[in-house]
Image: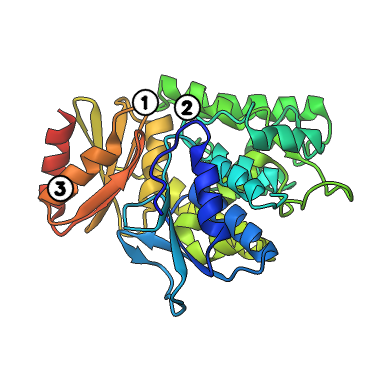
Amino acid sequence: MAVAGRSEDAAPDGVATALREAGFVRFRVAPGGDASAAAGLLARALAERDTPFQASVVRGGRPATTDTTGTDDTTTVRIGGTEPADVTLDLPGSASEAAFEAARELGSDPDPVLALAGAFTTPDATLEGSAAFEAARDHDRIEQRPGIGIPTADLTDGLAHTTLVHAGFSGDPDAVRGLLDGRETADTDEQRRRVASIVALAAAGAENATPRAAETVEDALRPYAISERSDDGPATAPEFATVGGYADVLRACAHERPGTGLALAIGHDVRDAALSAWRVHARRTHTAVRNATTARHRNLVVVRADADAPLATTARLLCEFRSPEPVVLVVGETEAAAAAADDRDLGTRMHEAATAADGDGAGGERRGGAAFADNEAFVTAFREAMA
C-alpha cells in the first residue's frame, strides 16, 4: 500500500491501516527532526501493539545503520526521502503531525510534545491549532512564556549551543557569559524577557546580519515550556526545557548522530548522548557559518564548505541570519544542502542539478539535499536551475 501525499485526512488513516496489518515494520527515515519525531511516534505505537520494527536514517538512498532483520510480511515505511516503500509519509506540512494522528488511529496515546517538537523543525512552522497542540494544552504539558527556546535550564549552555539563533556569541560559552553579564539564570518572567531582548539584539543587530535575522530570531522567543509529567496525562517527553529546545536537539542529532536521534524519538534514555551531539553539532555549525566564504549570484549564495561543516544546518543558518539572497547552497566534495527563505521548490531543483552531476537529490520547497560525483558540474547545474 502506498500513501503518497495527503488529502485532508486520508494519510493518517492509510498509514494506520497499513501498520495495523503489518507483521514487521521497517522505517526508512530522512535526516531531519520532523522525520525522526514521526518515526518515533509511529514506533512507540507499534511497541504498544507488540509489533516488531527496525528504523534507520537514510542518506542518499543508503541507510545509516545496518538492517539485518526482515520477514515475509515486512512493511516498509518511508518518512521523507525518495526511496521506494510500501507506505510513504511525505507531506507538504509536518510528518510528525500526521504520525501523531496515525498513532491515535492505532489506539495509542501519542506524546504530543514529541509531535510539536518535530513540527517545530519544519520551515514556516505553525504549532497552534494542530491535534498535537490541542492535546498538549489539554493535558497542561506546555505553557508559553517569555524567554528563549533552549533545551536546558543552563542559559550559558543553551545559548552557546542553540542553532535556532546565530550571533556573535554562538558556539562560545565564554562569549555568552560576557553577554549575560552575570545573568546565568532566568527564573522569573522579567528575567526571561531581559535575556530574550539581549539575544534578539545580538542576533539582529550584528554588523553582518540581514533584515531576515530580525524575523528569524522571533521563532526562538516566547517558547513553549514543557511541564513535568502528570500522573493522569500522556507519556512525558524527555527532560528538555522547551519545545523549541527539544526540536533543536532532535534536528541536530538527525544530522550528527542519527542513531541517537532515532533512539531519542523512540523513547530510549539517551538524553545525555543527545545533548552531547547537539553541542558538537552547534559548535561545528557556528564555526562554519562564521568562516564561510561565499559567492553571490542572482537569488543565490554559494558556499564552499570545509570538510567538518554540517551542510544542512549551515545552509539554514546562513539563509536565516547572513545571506542577502533568498537561497543558500552549501557544497562539499560529494554532497550539498540548500535552504530558502520562501518557497522555491528546492527539492526538484536539487534533484535536477544532482542528476546532471551523476547523483541524486531531494527535498521540499525550502530545504534540499543532494549527493553527486562532480561538485563543479552540480553547482553549475544548480545555478542554471535557479535562474
> Mark 3 against mark 2, which lies toward the viewer?
3
Q: Which residue is mark 3?
A: 378
Front position in the image: 279 or 182 = 279
Q: Is residue 70 left or right of residue 156?
A: left
Identify whether 145 is placed above or below 360.
above
Identify whether 74 is placed above or below 286.
below
In contact (CB < 8 Å): disc 3 and disc 2 = no
Q: Which residue is mark 1?
A: 342
Looking at the image, is mark 3 or mark 1 earlier in the sequence? 1
In contact (CB < 8 Å): disc 3 and disc 1 = no
Which image quarter: residue 334?
A: bottom left
Q: Which residue is mark 2?
A: 206
> Mark 1 against mark 2, which lies toward the viewer?
1
Q: Position of residue 212 (x, y in %)?
A: 43, 23
Name the amino acid type tagged 1.
Asp
Q: Secondary structure at mark 2?
A: loop
Name the amino acid type tagged 2.
Ala
Name the amino acid type tagged 3.
Phe
Q: Is residue 4 left or right of residue 35?
A: left
Looking at the image, is mark 1 or mark 2 earlier in the sequence? 2
Q: Mark 2 Cα within 10 Å, few/some/many (few <14, many 20+)? A: some
Q: Looking at the image, can residue 194 be seen?
A: yes
Q: Secondary structure at mark 1?
A: loop
Q: Secondary structure at mark 3?
A: helix
Q: Position of residue 237 (x, y in %)?
A: 72, 51
